[in-house]
Amino acid sequence: MCEKETRPPFAGLSGRTPEELFGALPTPCYILDEAMLRRNASMLAELAKSAGCRLLLAQKAFSNFDLYPLLSDYLCGTEASGLYEARLGAEEMPGKEVHVFCAAYKDEEFDELLRYADHIVFNTPGQLERFGPAAKQAGKSIGLRINPECSTQDGHAIYDPCAPGSRLGTTRALWDEKMTPQLISLLDGLHFHTLCEQDADALELTLDAVQKQFGDVLLHMQWLNMGGGHHITRPGYDTLQLKKCIKEAKERWGVAVYLEPGEAWALNAGYLASRVQDVFQNGETKLVILDVSAACHMPDVLEMPYRPPLYSAGDTASDWYRLGGPTCLAGDVIGDYAFLFAPKRGDMLLFGDMAIYTTCKNNTFNGMPLPSIYVMREDKTLVCLRKFGYEDFRGRLGGGR
């Protein structure tokens, strides 16, 4: 149907077509793939065991808590970016660790946060000074996010915490200026997060920078959190190099090691089903309007940007079409795809790798309905987790009558 794609995004279909599996579902809808989630979780759990590290689920990438029971046996806890995610992790994955990092905590929320979090990481010495004593008194493990000033990004500046002028993390210069002995005594560990969909070679470069900038500090810490962005479950990822990095960090600094991947848990473990609403032509460009929106339903397509995989029944291409959403945003374009057969109104199109940064990041711009959320069980049966309607759109905007 469209151009040749890499098979992993659709491996969970087991050779069946989208219409065969999902044809009866209303579109647009997300489908979470239970079997692929378990596959990823098993790979990550094996890594944690063999490398001797502890793995967290970064909920910012995947927070569909109905699937937390499936994941809970494979990880040690969750990572949160604030109060609501911390509460979600504590309530939906009870008995597991809850780690939280926020660029700046709020006075009116911090007491409640202490009810849910086990590890609290601060962004700056100022935040540590303001909230650290209360966290320590509450028995929490306290960390500080560092900025090793080692950019390894290529083309994704929006996701580079080490870019000049970054607001994320404490540089060594800021440490030397602001970290008093009293503040240092509050710390149990250090945290860095510098990667985005990267391999272990980028981690190795980062660890060299961490040693140069903060190696002396780490000798007095109990743990090191290496953040997320590790694309561990992607085909071809160098797990041997990752294990080497973890082993060397443990031996060099005498610390326990945490990793908090997000995408790796749910990579290629979800789909977004849509149907063609219109086909027409503008000059030499052939256009397809779908009932899904890049801006609303897969925002990283525009923000990162990237072109999501689209299911194909063939390996060769004959004709190109530009796929776009129904909103008024001129740039609401998913991408250009080559088709073996001309798409027509009513055809189902299935996008892959849609479990991450979608259901937890979508929006209702233009009054677009939020897609329903389904889960495909390991026996291929489909269960609806959530349907959305007008009241979900309206309720976000006010109380009204």
Image: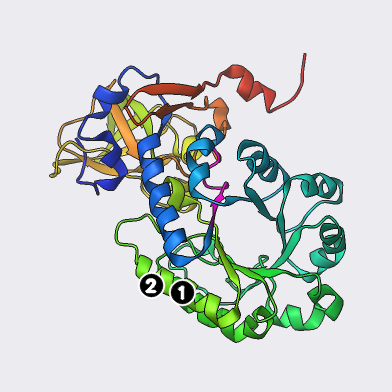
- Position of 260 compared to 46: left or right? right
Q: Give percent across and percent down for residue 397.
A: 70, 27
Q: Identify the secondary structure beneath mark 1.
A: helix
Q: Identify the secondary structure beneath mark 2.
A: helix
From this view, report whether residue 117 is shown above or below residue 24.
below
Can residue 252 be seen by looking at this rendering?
Answer: yes
What colour scheme does the image use? rainbow
Q: Give percent across and percent down for residue 129.
A: 85, 67
Q: Residue at x 57, y 47 (%)?
A: 60
Q: Give percent across and percent down for residue 308.
A: 36, 45
Q: Residue at x 43, y 68 (%)?
A: 154
- Position of 229 compared to 221: left or right? left
Dot 1 corresponds to which residue? 245
Q: Residue at x 49, y 60 (%)?
A: 229
At label 1, which amino acid type do we have? Answer: Cys
At label 2, which amino acid type do we have? Answer: Gln
- Position of 166 compared to 197: left or right? right
Within 10 Å of the Cα at label 2, are there few (<14), some (14-19), or many (20+) other Cα atoms?
some
From this view, report whether residue 265 is shown above or below residue 63.
below
Cβ–Cβ under 8 Å for marks 1 and 2: yes
From this view, report whether residue 126 is shown above or below residue 358.
below
| Residues shaded magenta | 55-63
The disc label shown at residue 241, or none: 2
Residue 315, image quadrant: top left
The disc label shown at residue 227, or none: none
Residue 289, image quadrant: top left
Q: Give percent across and percent down for residue 240.
A: 36, 69
| Residue 393 on the magenta span | no
| Residue 56 on the magenta span | yes
Q: In front: 227, or 325?
A: 227
Q: Quick one: quadrant of the C terminus?
A: top right
Q: Quick one: quadrant of the N terminus?
A: top left
